Image (cartoon, rainbow, N blue to C red):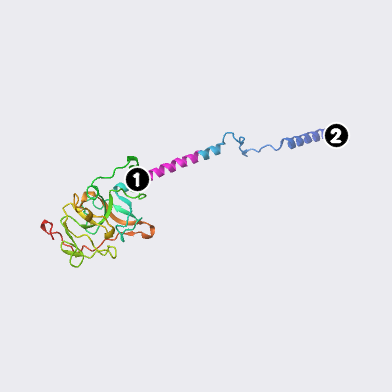
Amino acid sequence: MDTEAQHTERDRSSTTEERSRSARVSGPEPRPGNDALPRTEPEGGPRTEPEERRAAAGGWTWRRTGFVGGACVVFLLLLSHFVTQPFLIPSGSMEPTLHVGDRILVDKLAYRFGDRPRRGDVVVFDGTGSFLQEPAGQNPVTGLLHGAAAALGLAEPAETDFVKRVVGVGGDRVVCCGKDGWLTVNGVPVEERYVLLGDAPSKVPFDIVVPQGALWVMGDHRSQSSDSRDHLGQPGGGMVPVEQVVGRADWIAWPFGRWSEVAPTGAFDAVPAPAAGGHG
């Protein structure tokens, strides 16, 4: 056998065995094109790049949520101030039409473009100077927060705000009660089907003529309503100036089961316009 060939065989075998040992000790080398797993720092160390991206995204989400929420509140306040305002009904003076806890939507544009309140309209008005001679004093900060909550229908309206039904407009002569026990407007008896069943049209007799630019208003729950009748002997005689009207109540928006229109009434359809001088 060739001695040189034997030496060559042994050299090759030896080289192969050394490579095999080296591979077992050091492990396989990463193949080109394979991404190595990211090295993470020990607990308490700096964040990895993906964690930083997630944290930054979370922070932006909170900021964006706060911004969107604030913008929505501002939009609702502007809408409430100029277009439609929700009002929380705090008492039973307008039952059965409106119940305690109802949220009504008041159309603040109803009388902005030349239209005037009509007999039978349910209106919200500022009673300062008619139902209240002086506004109640309160802390400015508390008043601002309460006003914002009331504008969103989350709190009771201001003490100066009232909701009643228009019974007489400028020039009308309103009398209670006629021979049949009904209230009359300009000499015509009015069948007030919206008045709470069992209530009299009024237990307080009156005979008044509504001045131009003013309204005579009453609650539908006559025995539980403090309205124009209660201010007959005061300055203004219980008349509400038209410019003090905030808007017309058009919808009951809440509770959901009471969602409905504040239905108009035909009770005054037969009432004629007031005669010259305001006497019917």
Residue 220 is one of the magenta-drawn residues? no
Q: Which residue is mark 2?
A: 6
Where is residue 143 drawn, in percent x and y? 33, 43
What kind of element bears circle 1? helix
Magenta residues? 56-76
Amino acid at pointer 1 = His
Image marks 1 and 2: residues in contact by CB distance under 8 Å = no
Where is residue 29 drawn, in percent x and y? 68, 36
At 44% from the left edge and 40% from the top edge, which residue is drawn? 63
Is residue 242 shown above or below 59? Answer: below
Where is residue 162 drawn, in percent x and y? 28, 52
What kind of element bears circle 2? helix
**Split into 4 quadrants, where in the image is the N terminus?**
top right
Residue 69 is one of the magenta-drawn residues? yes
Of residues 134 and 60, the one drawn nearer to the viewer in this rendering: 134
Where is residue 155 drawn, in percent x and y? 36, 49
At 33% from the left edge and 60% from the top edge, which residue is drawn? 260
